[in-house]
Image (spheres, rainbow, N blue to C red):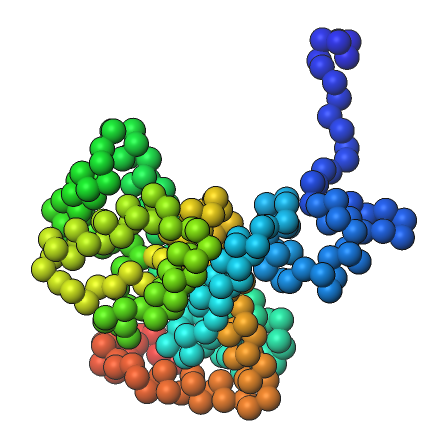
Amino acid sequence: MSSAETGPLPSNKLKTSITNLLPGKILVRGYPLQELIGNINYGEVIYLCLKGELPDKNTARMLNALLLGITDHGLVSAASPPARIVCAGNPDPIKGLCAGILSIGVVTGSPKESARFINGAFSMMNEQNLTPEQAADKIVDDYTANRKRLLGVGHPLFKDADIRAARLREIAVQTGFIGDKLKLFEMIHQKYLQKLGKKNLVINVDGMMAAIMCEMGFDEDMIDIIAVLSYLPGICAHTYEELKEKTGMGLVFQLAMAFEYAGPEERHLPKDRQS
């Protein structure tokens, strides 16, 4: 069979559009790395790597604010205790950091599912030619009828407002990232509270981060990545503190004391199984 019949042979070279390594030169998205160092900040280089272009001033400010959104939750977190416990058993910073990062997901630390919900609600509104209020009513009716939890809402420590979400919203106003998706999410939140007859289920930091990043054009996987980067300073600090203070085993014992055994009482093997 000829090459004309089979088509071109696949290239053996892997391709990337991120970085080009040349003799004496490193180009990141086309920019010489030495020009980036000292001239743009960390948030800007993250944006450049993920999106392929440098952000404008407002986008850079908003992204840098988002990178501080979930800096740390202390030990009331799913990320910091694993980092400390792993370092207690294996004193190595990289292993501690990895343990903390691996704990971030749908339940804690990641706005990805909230972003998926917001994008889905916005698409449904447009596809069905609904007003924001009509779309919000339809979604809330479905969620309350089926006893589904609204993502991005509620926090055990914040009842009147999530201070982090409120601050991020302020910056979104200042930088021009209050758009139709965020407004729809806030409308859904209001209708949800009205339907439940509650006032203390605030839009939390995950929900606000998701809504703002949807407005910024980040896809759901990018939103996940930004959340990890936002969480990372706290995980780093807890990992380092554990390596120096060595308190992790105390945390393990405290966790053990917080549990109540609910299994069977003491029992023994049958006599024919005992030696």
Q: Is residue 158 left or right of residue 209?
A: left
Q: How far across and down, in percent of the image, does residue 42 sit?
A: 63, 62
Q: Residue at x 38, y 62 (%)?
A: 170
The image quadrant where one finds the C terminus is bottom left
In the rendered image, residue 114, in percent from the top left (x then y), is placed at: 35, 52
Residue 145 x %, y %: 12, 46
| Viewer-side residue, 208 vs 264 | 208
Give the left or right position of residue 209, taking residue 248 as reference: left
Q: Is residue 179 above or below residue 158?
A: above
Residue 26 point in image, percent of width and height: 80, 51
45 horizontally vs 30: left or right = left
Residue 28 placement, left or right of 227? right
Q: Tell me which residue sits at (51%, 49%) in the image.
A: 222
Q: Quadrant of residue 79?
A: bottom left
* Quadrant (top left, top right, bottom left, bottom right) of the N terminus: top right
Residue at image point 54% right, 72% down: 233
Answer whether residue 99 is visible to the viewer in this image.
Answer: no
